[in-house]
Image (cartoon, helix red, strand yellow):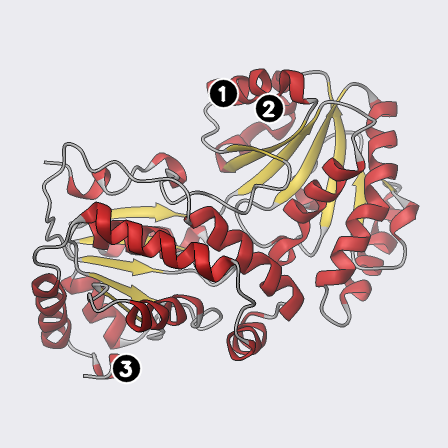
Amino acid sequence: MNDAQYKTAADFDALFKQLAQKSDGRNPESYLDRWQGLWQRLAQEPPAPSLLSGMAQAGAMSEADLSAGLRVILTGLSHGRPDFSGIKVPCRRRVAIVAAGNIPGVAVAPAVTLAAAGCPVVVKLSRSEPYFLPWLLEKWQESYAEPAGIVAHPWPGDSRATEALLGCAETILAFGNDFTVWDIRDIYRSKQVFGFGQKFSIAWAGSSEPSPEQLRALAHDVALFRQNGCLSVQVVFVHGGKQEALDFARQFAPVLDDVAQQFALPGAGLHSRQIQDELDLLGVLWARECRPHASCVIMPEKFEHEFMRGGCVVQVVSAQNIADAIAQIGSYWPAVQGVSLVWPEADRSGQQEQWYQQGVGYVRCAGRMQAPPLDWANGGIELPRAVCAE
C-alpha cells in the first residue's frame, strides 16, 4: 500500500503489525552500524540537487543553507551510540512520531533509534519538511536488503489519517510548538507521550578577543537553518562587563553577516533593516557593522526575550558569571536547550561541567551545536530506554 493510502485505524493497525514482523531478528548494533555508515558516506557527498530544491521550496530556506546544514546533521548522527542495556529487545511498542518542520530531520534520530530496538515506527512529517527522512529511507533501501522498519509521510495534522495513526500508537513523540505538544498530551493522555516543544540555545563567550575561527564557528551556530532550531544560538553572554560585550559584538557582527549572507534567501536584508529601525526607535544599541545586510547583532543592557526574532538576529549581553546569565534569562531558563562555548581551550572543559551542573544537557564548542550525536538525550529523554525499559 502506498503511504498516502493509510487512512483508517485498520490501515495503521495492519501497518504496525507489518513493520513489527519485518523487524524479527534485527540486531540493534548491526542495524545502527549500517545507518551510521550510510550517514557518514552521505555527509561526504554533495546533496542531491532535487532534494535541495524540494526542501528549499517547502521550508523557505536557501539551498546553500540546507547543503551546509545537512552535512552537519549527518556528521553528528554518524557519532554516538544509544544504550540498549536493560531493555527488552525486540521492543514491540507501536511508535508514532509527529515531526516539526522548522529544521530538517528532527525525527531521524528517534525513528532510527527506536526502530533499532524493534519498535514499529510511523512518522507524520511536516508539510514544510517532507523530504529528508523519506530520502534517507530511499538511500537505505538502495544500500541494504534489510527493511528499515520506518514509514514516513506528510499526512495533514488535522486529518482523519493522523487521528487514526495516533490512536493506534502506544507511544507518541510530539515535536512542534508548545501548543501542538499540549494538544497531543491532552487528547492522548492515556498513552505514553513525550513532548519536544519550543526551546532556544545560548552562547557563553569567555573573552572579548575570540579567535577568527571561533567567531566564524559561532556564526554558523546562529545562521544555519535561519536560526530556526532549538539548538540555534539566540543570545551570546559575554563574560565581563558592558565594554567586553560591546567589543565582542563589534567583532562578531561582520563575521555573522558574512555567513548569514551566504545562507540568506532573497529579501533577508529587509527583515534586518526593519529590526534595526525598530531598535533605533527604542534607543537600543546594535552593531552598525552589520548594516544593511542579512543579520543584526543587538546590544541591549540585559537579555530581552522580545528580541529573539530568528532570521539571524542575535543579542550580545554581558554577564559576570554563569549564575548572572541564568538570572537574566529568568523564567525562560527551562526553555534553554543548549550552550555553545566560545572559550579558551585551557578552561573549556571546566566551563562545560559548570553548565552541566546547572542542568543543561547539551554543551558544545562553537561550531558543533547543530550536530547532535545519535545518542543525544533531547529534553533529557534517553531513547530507547524511556520507551522500552522493562
> Which type of secondary structure does the marked residue at label 1 adopt?
loop
In the image, what residue type sits under mark 1?
Gln
Disc 1: CA contacts within 10 A as few (<14), some (14-19) or many (>=20): few
Q: Where is residue 109 in the image (x, y as percent from the top left)?
A: 36, 51
Q: Quadrant of residue 378?
A: top left
Q: On the picture, is 54 further left or further right than 83? A: right
Nearer to us: label 2 or label 1 = 1
The first of marks 3 and 2 along the sequence is 3
The local secondary structure at tag 3 comes to helix
Up the image or down, 153 lies above or below 43; here it is below
- What is the quadrant of residue 330 in the picture? top right
Q: Please give the label number shown on residue 326.
A: 2
CA separation in Å, label 2 and label 1: 9 Å
- Is residue 94 shown left or right of residue 378? left
Q: Where is residue 32 in the image (x, y as percent from the top left)?
A: 28, 50
- Name the amino acid, label 2: Ile
Residue 30 at x, y percent in the picture = 23, 50
- Viewer can see residue 197: no
Query: Mark 3 belongs to which amino acid?
Result: Ala
Which quadrant of the view contains residue 41?
A: bottom left
Dot 2: what SS? helix
Of 278 and 317, the residue lying toward us: 317
Calculate the distance from the C-alpha at mark 3 to the C-alpha at mark 1.
45 Å
Q: Mark 1 points at which residue?
A: 358
- Name the residue rendered at 59%, 19% in the picture: 351
Side of 182 relative to 14 (left or right): right
Q: Earlier in the sequence, mark 2 or mark 1?
A: 2
Of labels 3 and 1, earlier in sequence is 3
